[in-house]
Image: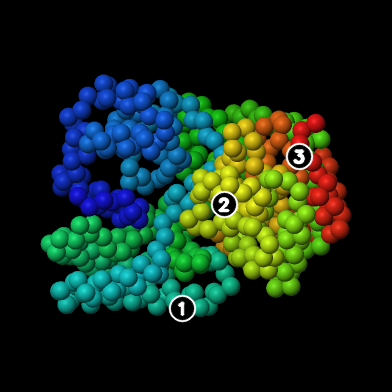
Amino acid sequence: MVSTRKLPYEEFLEECKFLRSSGECPYYSNIRKININYLMPNIVDGVGNVNEYVSTLCTHNVCPYEVSRMYMDRARVGIMTYYYIFSINKPETMNIDVKNSVLVIDEAHNLPDTISSLNSIDLPLTSVVASINEVRRLVDDEELRNRTIKILRGLQTYMVKLSKVLEEETMVSLELGDVLQFFEDFQAITDAYYEIIKRKRSAGVPIPYTPLSRLLDFHRAILNRVSGFSVFLARDEQGVSLVYKCVDPSVVSGPVINEAGGVVLMSGTLPPRDYVTSMLGISRGIAEYRIGFRDYVRSENYGVLIYDGVTTRYVERDEEEYAKIANILSRVYQVYPLDKAILSIFPSYAVLKSVRKYLSPSVKYIMELGNTSIDDLIRDLRNDRKRLIMAVAGGKLVEGVEYRLGSENLLGLIIIVGVPYPEPNDYLDDVMEILAARLNDRKLAWELTYQWPAIVRIKQAVGRAFRSESDRALVVLMDRRFREARLAKVFEDYFGKYVIVNEDALINEVLNFNVTPH
């Protein structure tokens, strides 16, 4: 059997579904032959992590997912991702009795955005183009081929035309009817899909897949027309996509949270109560407990500086500003006296790359990339701890990670480069309108939609340096906007102190800050 280890997730699910339905997956078939009550206790007690758990079950020739799903019926505690609780169209299912369960949700500040992402379906332009090529090559019936290509060509023209008109926008709202018009003869797409899969299998292709499956999934989603969803054209570094996106996560989370036996929402950076209850649709009684930064970090263990000589404000971004930021980072790195890493956080990958090219050659840096892992990063820091880590706000090197070797925190300096406001787009405007209607306060709705995500990202980044009562670190907020009243008040309340510095004072503070506990 050819390994499916490196398949994209959508292709893996397609192959898994086919193998199970055709009886060709021995791992799935063997489930009926095992004594789960005997097998699972021995395996769970004998493994140290998830990878070992999966590998051990595979050596018993059974499907780890199916075994886990079955064992959940007998378990009192289950640990899983948000996906299994807050996804509407689950290709995998767990039998969870929510009404008789207590849900303990960690990193709850991410829950609204995660629910939106989990329940959104995208159709990339690249998939449409790839589908045209496959239909041309692999559909022999001329009538079916022409009908299918007509649909795909229409979609391609529509998406390309919109992308040219909207070159400066990251996400724009579309009328659902304008998109549905291209799917009036959708039976052609379905027939072409099965024709291509059949032909690939008959040709002996070990893992048959066609990008037409993306069109099937997208069409299925938009036909549902669920309340709280809208259609957008989205643009990122990979190109443009049609996205059927959840703009109101409460339609998913509300029924779950309000019906559960109990719910605990946990986060070190939970947004204001109005945001949490409105976005998640919470109508049940709430008890709220908040522990401030100063409640667990002693004042002598940190310093906070605001350097207002630069900004990443969108209308002020240019090469000169990027060079200024790079120069400051280079100077800080050069005078930094400690054998610890510097974590610098950027509002976007584009800003990060623009600054990086102006760094001094003497700066040893680690830049967040698509394939960067925290394990590899810690391995690099073990060999050479004085590195400038260049990460993106809200990214995988900032949230939910530990920069530790044993009891030692590897970070001694956190630099927030710019205010990581989300970039305005039609999706966020829709979210803001929902909040404004529920709270009857447009100003508060704007703050909750745009300002608080930035504040949460900053707090998450700062939190990487304080994981125990003995940790000490210096925090630098590097943007003149941190002096504006609405942000200054938030961080003055949070930290209890900060000092506004010029470049020379900043360098002097970095040089003299001591992270050794008293």
Describe residue 56's horizontal placement relative to residue 366 as left or right.
left
Of the two numbered discs 1 and 3 on the same chain, state the one appearing first in sequence.
Answer: 1
Residue 490 appears in the rendering: no
Cα–Cα span, label 1 and label 3: 55 Å
Amino acid type assigned to the residue bearing label 2 in the image: Gly
Q: Position of residue 333 (x, y in %)?
A: 73, 56
Q: Position of residue 59 (x, y in %)?
A: 25, 35
Of the two numbered discs 2 and 3 on the same chain, state the one appearing first in sequence.
Answer: 2
* Quadrant in which residue 79 is drawn: top left
Q: Which residue is mark 2?
A: 395
Q: Which residue is mark 1?
A: 161
Describe residue 169's horizontal placement relative to residue 295 as left or right.
left
Mark 1 or 3: the one toward you: 3
Cα–Cα span, label 2 and label 3: 26 Å
Q: Residue furthest left?
A: 202
The C terminus is located in which quarter? Answer: top right
Q: Position of residue 366 (x, y in %)?
A: 59, 56
Q: Point out which mark residue 515 bears.
A: 3
Q: Residue furthest front?
A: 383
Amino acid type assigned to the residue bearing label 3 in the image: Val
Residue lying at 81% horizontally and 44% vertically, measured from the top left:
513
Mark 2 or 1: the one toward you: 2
Residue lying at 75% horizontally and 51% vertically, measured from the top left:
336
